[in-house]
Image (cartoon, grey):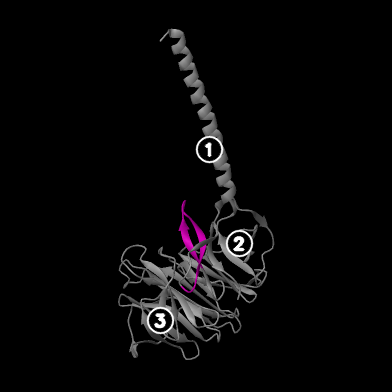
Amino acid sequence: MSIRIRILLAVTGVLVLAAAATVYTSLARHDARTDAAEHSIAVTRAPVTVGEGLLFFSYNDPGEGQGVVAAVPMTEPLATRRISQLHCDRFSAASGKAICLRPSAAPLPASEVLILNHELGELRSVEVPGIPSRAQLSANGRMASWTTFVTGDSYARGSFSTRSGILDTETGELIANIEDIPLYLDGERHRAMDVNYWGITFAGDDDTFYATVSTGGETHLVRGQVSEWEARALRSNVECPSLSADGTRLVFKKRVHAGNRPWRLHVLDLATMTERPLAETSSIDDQVAWLDDNTLAYTKPAPNDSTNIWSVPADGSGQPRLLVRSASSPSTPR
Protein backbone atom coordinates (compact mmCIF):
# COMPACT_ATOMS: atom_id res chain seq x y z
CA MET A 1 0.00 0.00 0.00
CA SER A 2 1.42 3.37 -1.05
CA ILE A 3 2.03 6.21 1.35
CA ARG A 4 -0.56 8.34 -0.51
CA ILE A 5 -3.27 5.71 0.02
CA ARG A 6 -2.35 5.35 3.70
CA ILE A 7 -2.67 9.12 4.16
CA LEU A 8 -6.06 9.17 2.42
CA LEU A 9 -7.32 6.32 4.64
CA ALA A 10 -6.10 8.08 7.76
CA VAL A 11 -7.77 11.35 6.78
CA THR A 12 -10.98 9.51 5.93
CA GLY A 13 -10.94 7.80 9.34
CA VAL A 14 -10.51 11.09 11.12
CA LEU A 15 -13.39 12.64 9.18
CA VAL A 16 -15.62 9.65 9.98
CA LEU A 17 -14.78 9.87 13.68
CA ALA A 18 -15.42 13.63 13.68
CA ALA A 19 -18.76 13.15 11.97
CA ALA A 20 -19.70 10.43 14.45
CA ALA A 21 -18.73 12.66 17.35
CA THR A 22 -20.82 15.50 15.91
CA VAL A 23 -23.84 13.21 15.50
CA TYR A 24 -23.37 11.79 19.04
CA THR A 25 -23.09 15.28 20.53
CA SER A 26 -26.18 16.40 18.67
CA LEU A 27 -28.15 13.36 19.80
CA ALA A 28 -26.94 13.76 23.38
CA ARG A 29 -28.03 17.40 23.40
CA HIS A 30 -31.40 16.39 21.96
CA ASP A 31 -31.79 13.67 24.58
CA ALA A 32 -30.85 16.12 27.33
CA ARG A 33 -33.36 18.67 26.05
CA THR A 34 -36.02 15.96 25.75
CA ASP A 35 -35.26 14.66 29.25
CA ALA A 36 -35.37 18.20 30.66
CA ALA A 37 -38.66 18.86 28.92
CA GLU A 38 -40.15 15.63 30.23
CA HIS A 39 -39.08 16.48 33.77
CA SER A 40 -39.66 20.24 33.73
CA ILE A 41 -42.21 21.59 36.17
CA ALA A 42 -44.32 24.62 35.32
CA VAL A 43 -45.15 26.78 38.34
CA THR A 44 -46.82 30.09 38.97
CA ARG A 45 -47.01 32.33 42.03
CA ALA A 46 -50.74 32.63 42.56
CA PRO A 47 -53.27 32.55 45.41
CA VAL A 48 -53.78 29.00 46.68
CA THR A 49 -57.19 28.43 48.26
CA VAL A 50 -58.66 25.31 49.81
CA GLY A 51 -61.30 23.96 47.44
CA GLU A 52 -62.63 20.72 46.04
CA GLY A 53 -61.09 19.26 42.90
CA LEU A 54 -57.56 20.25 43.92
CA LEU A 55 -54.61 18.14 44.96
CA PHE A 56 -52.48 19.89 47.58
CA PHE A 57 -48.90 18.99 48.43
CA SER A 58 -45.60 20.29 49.71
CA TYR A 59 -43.41 21.29 46.74
CA ASN A 60 -39.87 19.99 47.24
CA ASP A 61 -37.90 21.82 44.56
CA PRO A 62 -35.20 23.99 46.21
CA GLY A 63 -35.23 26.41 43.29
CA GLU A 64 -38.80 27.47 44.00
CA GLY A 65 -38.68 27.32 47.78
CA GLN A 66 -38.31 24.07 49.68
CA GLY A 67 -41.54 22.89 51.23
CA VAL A 68 -43.98 25.52 49.96
CA VAL A 69 -47.63 24.46 49.74
CA ALA A 70 -48.78 24.01 46.14
CA ALA A 71 -51.86 22.78 44.30
CA VAL A 72 -52.86 21.30 40.95
CA PRO A 73 -56.23 20.14 39.59
CA MET A 74 -56.95 16.53 40.55
CA THR A 75 -57.75 15.76 36.93
CA GLU A 76 -54.53 17.38 35.65
CA PRO A 77 -51.70 16.61 38.08
CA LEU A 78 -49.10 17.65 35.47
CA ALA A 79 -50.70 21.07 34.94
CA THR A 80 -48.98 24.29 36.01
CA ARG A 81 -48.85 24.16 39.78
CA ARG A 82 -49.82 27.12 41.91
CA ILE A 83 -47.30 27.71 44.67
CA SER A 84 -47.98 29.71 47.80
CA GLN A 85 -45.75 31.51 50.29
CA LEU A 86 -46.60 29.00 53.06
CA HIS A 87 -43.93 26.47 54.08
CA CYS A 88 -45.09 23.17 55.61
CA ASP A 89 -43.44 19.80 56.19
CA ARG A 90 -46.89 18.19 56.48
CA PHE A 91 -50.12 19.61 55.12
CA SER A 92 -53.74 18.45 55.12
CA ALA A 93 -56.82 20.24 53.79
CA ALA A 94 -60.54 19.59 54.27
CA SER A 95 -63.81 21.54 54.05
CA GLY A 96 -62.30 24.98 53.69
CA LYS A 97 -59.62 24.54 56.37
CA ALA A 98 -56.10 23.20 56.54
CA ILE A 99 -53.43 22.13 59.02
CA CYS A 100 -49.75 22.90 58.52
CA LEU A 101 -47.02 21.21 60.56
CA ARG A 102 -43.53 22.69 60.30
CA PRO A 103 -40.37 23.25 62.36
CA SER A 104 -40.56 26.03 64.91
CA ALA A 105 -38.01 28.78 65.38
CA ALA A 106 -37.58 27.71 69.02
CA PRO A 107 -33.99 26.91 70.10
CA LEU A 108 -34.90 23.33 71.06
CA PRO A 109 -36.38 20.89 68.51
CA ALA A 110 -40.01 21.98 68.27
CA SER A 111 -42.81 22.20 65.75
CA GLU A 112 -45.49 24.71 64.93
CA VAL A 113 -49.06 23.58 64.27
CA LEU A 114 -51.00 26.09 62.16
CA ILE A 115 -54.74 25.94 61.62
CA LEU A 116 -55.60 27.80 58.40
CA ASN A 117 -58.69 29.13 56.64
CA HIS A 118 -59.56 28.52 52.98
CA GLU A 119 -57.13 31.24 51.89
CA LEU A 120 -54.34 29.69 54.00
CA GLY A 121 -54.62 32.51 56.49
CA GLU A 122 -53.71 31.64 60.07
CA LEU A 123 -56.59 30.98 62.49
CA ARG A 124 -54.55 29.54 65.35
CA SER A 125 -51.06 28.31 66.08
CA VAL A 126 -49.76 25.86 68.68
CA GLU A 127 -46.13 25.14 69.48
CA VAL A 128 -45.33 21.52 70.35
CA PRO A 129 -42.09 19.66 71.11
CA GLY A 130 -40.38 17.52 68.51
CA ILE A 131 -39.74 17.25 64.78
CA PRO A 132 -42.69 17.20 62.31
CA SER A 133 -43.91 13.74 61.35
CA ARG A 134 -47.65 13.47 60.62
CA ALA A 135 -50.66 15.81 60.36
CA GLN A 136 -54.25 15.26 59.33
CA LEU A 137 -57.55 17.10 59.37
CA SER A 138 -60.91 15.36 59.76
CA ALA A 139 -63.19 15.30 56.71
CA ASN A 140 -65.27 18.31 57.80
CA GLY A 141 -62.22 20.26 58.96
CA ARG A 142 -63.07 20.28 62.64
CA MET A 143 -60.58 17.90 64.28
CA ALA A 144 -56.88 18.47 63.72
CA SER A 145 -54.29 15.90 64.73
CA TRP A 146 -50.51 15.67 64.48
CA THR A 147 -47.45 13.67 65.50
CA THR A 148 -43.87 14.73 66.16
CA PHE A 149 -40.67 12.83 66.90
CA VAL A 150 -39.02 13.62 70.23
CA THR A 151 -35.85 12.60 72.05
CA GLY A 152 -34.90 12.30 75.68
CA ASP A 153 -37.40 9.72 76.96
CA SER A 154 -35.41 7.38 79.22
CA TYR A 155 -37.27 4.24 78.11
CA ALA A 156 -36.53 4.80 74.42
CA ARG A 157 -32.90 3.49 74.59
CA GLY A 158 -31.88 4.84 71.22
CA SER A 159 -35.27 4.35 69.59
CA PHE A 160 -37.68 7.14 68.74
CA SER A 161 -40.49 8.52 70.86
CA THR A 162 -43.51 10.45 69.68
CA ARG A 163 -45.95 13.09 70.84
CA SER A 164 -49.41 13.15 69.28
CA GLY A 165 -52.00 15.84 69.85
CA ILE A 166 -55.59 16.75 68.99
CA LEU A 167 -57.23 20.15 68.56
CA ASP A 168 -60.95 20.79 68.22
CA THR A 169 -60.90 23.79 65.89
CA GLU A 170 -64.49 24.75 66.81
CA THR A 171 -64.34 24.64 70.62
CA GLY A 172 -60.62 25.35 70.89
CA GLU A 173 -60.10 22.32 73.16
CA LEU A 174 -56.45 21.23 72.93
CA ILE A 175 -55.00 17.87 73.97
CA ALA A 176 -51.30 18.41 73.44
CA ASN A 177 -50.36 14.79 74.20
CA ILE A 178 -52.82 11.88 74.13
CA GLU A 179 -50.55 9.44 75.98
CA ASP A 180 -52.63 9.65 79.16
CA ILE A 181 -55.73 8.21 77.44
CA PRO A 182 -56.70 4.90 79.13
CA LEU A 183 -55.45 2.09 76.88
CA TYR A 184 -56.93 -1.41 76.71
CA LEU A 185 -55.02 -4.35 75.19
CA ASP A 186 -56.91 -7.67 74.90
CA GLY A 187 -59.66 -6.14 76.99
CA GLU A 188 -57.33 -5.36 79.91
CA ARG A 189 -56.20 -1.92 81.03
CA HIS A 190 -52.58 -1.45 79.99
CA ARG A 191 -50.17 0.77 81.88
CA ALA A 192 -46.55 1.23 80.78
CA MET A 193 -43.93 3.95 80.50
CA ASP A 194 -43.18 3.21 76.85
CA VAL A 195 -46.62 3.96 75.37
CA ASN A 196 -46.36 6.06 72.19
CA TYR A 197 -49.12 7.09 69.77
CA TRP A 198 -48.83 8.30 66.19
CA GLY A 199 -50.79 8.64 62.96
CA ILE A 200 -54.20 9.79 64.25
CA THR A 201 -57.11 9.71 61.78
CA PHE A 202 -60.69 10.78 62.61
CA ALA A 203 -64.04 9.30 61.60
CA GLY A 204 -66.93 11.39 60.31
CA ASP A 205 -68.47 11.86 63.78
CA ASP A 206 -65.41 13.91 64.89
CA ASP A 207 -65.32 11.79 68.04
CA THR A 208 -64.05 8.38 66.97
CA PHE A 209 -60.43 8.14 65.89
CA TYR A 210 -57.91 5.48 64.93
CA ALA A 211 -54.19 5.56 65.63
CA THR A 212 -51.08 3.46 66.11
CA VAL A 213 -49.89 2.71 69.62
CA SER A 214 -46.49 1.22 70.37
CA THR A 215 -45.69 -0.52 73.63
CA GLY A 216 -43.56 -3.49 74.63
CA GLY A 217 -41.88 -3.54 71.24
CA GLU A 218 -45.15 -4.09 69.33
CA THR A 219 -47.48 -1.81 67.39
CA HIS A 220 -51.27 -1.96 67.52
CA LEU A 221 -54.18 -0.31 65.78
CA VAL A 222 -56.41 1.37 68.36
CA ARG A 223 -59.87 2.87 68.12
CA GLY A 224 -60.46 5.74 70.52
CA GLN A 225 -63.20 8.16 71.45
CA VAL A 226 -62.62 11.70 72.61
CA SER A 227 -65.95 11.85 74.50
CA GLU A 228 -65.32 8.60 76.42
CA TRP A 229 -61.57 9.22 76.54
CA GLU A 230 -60.38 5.67 76.05
CA ALA A 231 -58.57 3.68 73.37
CA ARG A 232 -58.91 -0.04 72.64
CA ALA A 233 -56.52 -2.15 70.56
CA LEU A 234 -58.10 -3.86 67.53
CA ARG A 235 -55.16 -5.72 65.96
CA SER A 236 -51.37 -5.74 65.92
CA ASN A 237 -48.78 -4.68 63.34
CA VAL A 238 -50.59 -1.58 62.05
CA GLU A 239 -48.85 1.78 61.57
CA CYS A 240 -49.93 5.19 60.29
CA PRO A 241 -53.60 4.40 59.57
CA SER A 242 -55.70 6.66 57.36
CA LEU A 243 -59.48 6.30 57.22
CA SER A 244 -61.53 6.28 54.01
CA ALA A 245 -64.23 8.94 53.57
CA ASP A 246 -67.02 6.41 54.14
CA GLY A 247 -65.34 5.15 57.31
CA THR A 248 -65.26 1.51 56.20
CA ARG A 249 -61.56 1.00 55.40
CA LEU A 250 -58.13 1.94 56.69
CA VAL A 251 -54.96 2.10 54.66
CA PHE A 252 -51.84 1.45 56.73
CA LYS A 253 -48.25 0.31 56.54
CA LYS A 254 -47.53 -3.21 57.79
CA ARG A 255 -44.13 -4.47 58.87
CA VAL A 256 -43.42 -7.47 56.65
CA HIS A 257 -39.69 -7.98 57.23
CA ALA A 258 -36.73 -6.64 59.21
CA GLY A 259 -34.49 -3.81 58.04
CA ASN A 260 -34.55 -0.06 57.56
CA ARG A 261 -37.54 -0.02 55.16
CA PRO A 262 -39.64 -3.00 56.19
CA TRP A 263 -43.21 -1.97 55.32
CA ARG A 264 -45.86 -2.92 52.76
CA LEU A 265 -49.03 -0.88 52.28
CA HIS A 266 -52.30 -2.69 53.10
CA VAL A 267 -55.99 -1.80 53.26
CA LEU A 268 -58.06 -3.11 56.17
CA ASP A 269 -61.83 -3.71 55.92
CA LEU A 270 -63.12 -2.64 59.33
CA ALA A 271 -66.33 -4.71 59.09
CA THR A 272 -64.58 -8.04 58.42
CA MET A 273 -61.08 -7.18 59.73
CA THR A 274 -59.58 -8.64 56.57
CA GLU A 275 -56.57 -6.94 55.02
CA ARG A 276 -55.35 -6.73 51.44
CA PRO A 277 -51.82 -5.83 50.26
CA LEU A 278 -51.61 -3.07 47.66
CA ALA A 279 -49.83 -3.19 44.31
CA GLU A 280 -47.08 -0.89 45.62
CA THR A 281 -44.33 -3.28 46.73
CA SER A 282 -41.76 -0.65 47.75
CA SER A 283 -41.48 0.17 51.43
CA ILE A 284 -43.52 3.35 52.01
CA ASP A 285 -43.06 5.38 55.20
CA ASP A 286 -46.06 7.71 55.06
CA GLN A 287 -49.58 8.31 56.33
CA VAL A 288 -51.32 7.64 53.03
CA ALA A 289 -54.04 9.96 51.70
CA TRP A 290 -57.35 8.91 50.12
CA LEU A 291 -57.83 10.83 46.88
CA ASP A 292 -61.27 9.26 46.45
CA ASP A 293 -63.00 6.02 47.46
CA ASN A 294 -60.82 3.99 45.12
CA THR A 295 -57.46 5.75 44.91
CA LEU A 296 -54.62 6.32 47.38
CA ALA A 297 -51.69 8.74 47.23
CA TYR A 298 -48.39 8.64 49.09
CA THR A 299 -44.87 10.03 49.18
CA LYS A 300 -42.07 7.93 47.75
CA PRO A 301 -38.32 8.67 47.78
CA ALA A 302 -36.78 9.76 44.49
CA PRO A 303 -33.18 10.26 43.30
CA ASN A 304 -31.19 13.31 44.40
CA ASP A 305 -32.73 13.35 47.88
CA SER A 306 -36.12 14.36 46.50
CA THR A 307 -39.57 12.77 46.76
CA ASN A 308 -42.46 12.19 44.37
CA ILE A 309 -46.15 11.53 44.94
CA TRP A 310 -47.47 8.23 43.61
CA SER A 311 -50.96 6.76 43.47
CA VAL A 312 -52.28 3.20 43.58
CA PRO A 313 -55.75 1.59 43.54
CA ALA A 314 -57.20 0.88 46.98
CA ASP A 315 -58.43 -2.63 46.10
CA GLY A 316 -55.00 -4.15 45.50
CA SER A 317 -55.33 -4.17 41.71
CA GLY A 318 -53.42 -2.23 39.05
CA GLN A 319 -49.96 -0.74 39.31
CA PRO A 320 -48.44 2.27 41.10
CA ARG A 321 -48.52 5.46 39.02
CA LEU A 322 -46.33 8.54 39.30
CA LEU A 323 -48.65 11.46 40.07
CA VAL A 324 -46.64 14.57 41.00
CA ARG A 325 -42.86 15.10 40.85
CA SER A 326 -40.80 16.90 43.49
CA ALA A 327 -43.64 16.75 46.00
CA SER A 328 -44.73 15.22 49.30
CA SER A 329 -47.62 15.20 51.78
CA PRO A 330 -50.53 14.82 49.32
CA SER A 331 -53.99 15.96 50.41
CA THR A 332 -57.32 16.61 48.77
CA PRO A 333 -60.36 18.19 50.47
CA ARG A 334 -63.20 15.70 50.85
Task: Tell me the quarter of the image containing the C terminus.
Answer: bottom right
Q: Nearer the viewer, mark 3 or mark 2?
A: 3
In the rendered image, which quarter is residue 60 located in?
Answer: bottom right
Q: What whole-number distance in Å separates the C-alpha atoms at marks 3 and 2?
A: 32 Å
Q: Please name whichever residue, 118 or 299, is drawn nearer the observer in this view of the structure.
A: 299
The reply to whether residue 132 is in sight is yes
Looking at the image, residue 245 sits to the left or right of residue 195; the answer is right
Q: Please name whichever residue, 173 or 88, is drawn nearer the observer in this view of the structure.
A: 88
Residue type at mark 1? Ala
**Which mark sits nearer the N-terminus, 1 or 3?**
1
Q: Nearer the viewer, mark 2 or mark 1?
A: 1
Query: What segment carries the magenta color?
Result: 297-315
Task: Tell me the quarter of the image containing the N terminus.
Answer: top left
Q: What whole-number distance in Å separates the C-alpha atoms at marks 2 and 1?
A: 29 Å
For residue 274, the mark is: 3
Q: Residue at x 30, y 68 (%)?
A: 157
* 313 part of magenta stretch: yes
Looking at the image, residue 26 sits to the left or right of residue 117; the answer is left
Residue type at mark 3? Thr
